[in-house]
Image (spheres, rainbow, N blue to C red):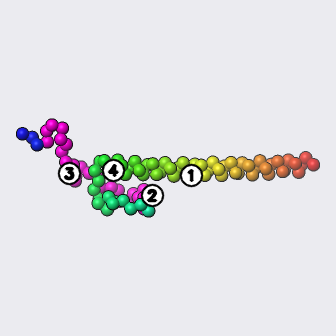
Amino acid sequence: EDSWSDGEQEPITVDQTWRGDPDSEADSIDSDQEDPLKHAGVYTAEEVALIMREKLIRLQSLYIDQFKRLQHLLKEKKRRYLHSRKAEHDAVGE
């Protein structure tokens, strides 16, 4: 009788795992939070999915923060422009 029957899954072998990307710059995002799996070199599909999900959430947060910062800068520059334009208009109108 087959020992892997009745819904049991075969164990994942090393050749079926993701070995990570040693040249990935995305690791710098996590540099302050040491990951115990980082030095193992071999990841299961579930571990890869979890790691990538966490990195995507972190990147999304960084992009949102950057977008808010750029919106603030745009509003501030618009305010300065309108203020200088009004001052120029008032100076010419006198």
Looking at the magenta stretch, what is its main secondary structure? loop
Residue 19 position in % (x across, y down): 29, 55
Vertical comparison of 59 with 9: above or below: below
Q: Tell me the CA gap for discs 1 and 4.
A: 27 Å
Q: Are marks 2 and 1 in contact (CB under 8 Å)?
A: no
Q: Please name the residue shown 68% across and 48% down the image.
A: 75
Magenta residue span: 4-31
| Residue most extreme to the right | 94
Tell me the residue that label 4 is attached to. 48
Q: Tell me the CA gap for discs 3 and 2.
A: 29 Å
The residue type indicated by label 1 comes to Gln
Tell me the residue that label 3 is attached to. 13
Residue 64 position in % (x across, y down): 54, 48
Q: Tell me the CA gap for discs 1 and 3.
A: 41 Å
Q: Tell me the CA gap for discs 2 and 1.
A: 15 Å
Tell me the residue that label 1 is attached to. 66
Q: Residues within 10 Å of mark 4 (few under 14, many from 20)?
A: some
The residue type indicated by label 3 comes to Thr
SS assignment at label 3? loop
SS assignment at label 1? helix
